[in-house]
Amino acid sequence: MNMLHLLRHAKSSAKEDVEDYERPLSRRGRKTARRVGRNLSAELGAIDLVLCSSSRRTRETLDLVLDEFSPGTLPRTSIEEELYLASREKLTARLGRLDARDVNVLLIGHNPGLHELAVALADENSPGFRALASGKFPTAAYISLRVPVDWPVLGCSRHELIGYVTPESLPDEDE
């Protein structure tokens, strides 16, 4: 049984005078990424592979999330240019090329493609689907899907949405 987790990057800084690709995380984004990382490491178990867009804000999100994992449980990572602002179709195609040995996969990317992918893959009868489909997919939100098929046919059916977590749904923590 494969597991797929889709994580939108944390909040980036709009104040920086840099190209979109090079925008860093904001202070709030860094704090939220750490909180989400603690939750991910507790909830998802051992992740085999993280696919991450090559933009600065997604790489910073990746680093802060992985800082919350135990050293012995760090997954392999692949930072890929093709994931930067990728469409739902490009994301689906990339996931379809995953190796069968990667059964628990985290993808860190961008809207709108990531949200469109989440809605397209999630079973409409799953708890949380309505909130996912009718709302936004905010920064640092993630979903988890149970995927009972091989990766090459991922986009041919819908899969059980077993978790939809937004930063607002996590308990506040003092840092």
Image: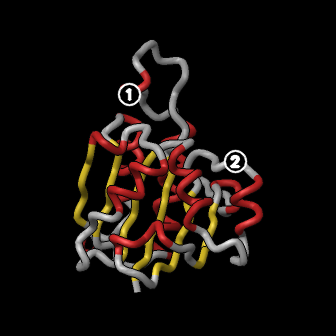
Q: CA distance from mark 2 to mark 1?
A: 22 Å
Horizontal side of residue 113 vs 136, given as left or right: left
Whole-percent x, y for residue 52 in the image: 34, 50
Horizontal side of residue 65 vs 160, given as left or right: left
- Residue 4 image-quadrant placement: bottom left
Q: Quadrant of the N terminus?
A: bottom left
User: Which residue corresponds to the image point at 27% horizontal and 63% vertical from the top-left?
Assistant: 97
Can residue 108 be spotted in the picture? yes
Residues packed near mark 1 inside 10 Å, few (<14), some (14 to 19) or many (20 plus): some
Residue nearest the viewer, comparing 29 with 44: 44
Residue nearest the viewer, comparing 118 with 57: 118
Q: Which residue is mark 2?
A: 136
Name the outermost residue toward the front: 156
Is the Cβ of the residue at disc 2 closer than 8 Å to that at disc 1? no
Q: Amino acid at mark 2?
A: Lys
Horizontal side of residue 100 vs 85, given as left or right: left
Name the outermost residue toward the top: 17
Can residue 175 be spotted in the picture? no
Whole-percent x, y for residue 135 in the image: 74, 51
Q: Is residue 153 above or below residue 170?
A: below
Q: Secondary structure at mark 2?
A: loop
Q: Amino acid at mark 1?
A: Tyr
User: Which residue corresponds to the image point at 70% horizontal and 61% vertical from the top-left?
Assistant: 169
**Earlier-in-chain disc, 2 versus 1:** 1
User: Which residue corresponds to the image point at 65% horizontal and 62% vertical from the top-left?
Assistant: 170
The dot on residue 10 is: none
Q: Is residue 109 above or below residue 43?
A: above
Report how many numbered discs are placed on residues in the image. Answer: 2
- Residue 127 image-quadrant placement: bottom right
Residue nearest the viewer, comparing 136 with 154: 154
Whole-percent x, y for residue 7 in the image: 49, 56
Q: Which residue is mark 1?
A: 21
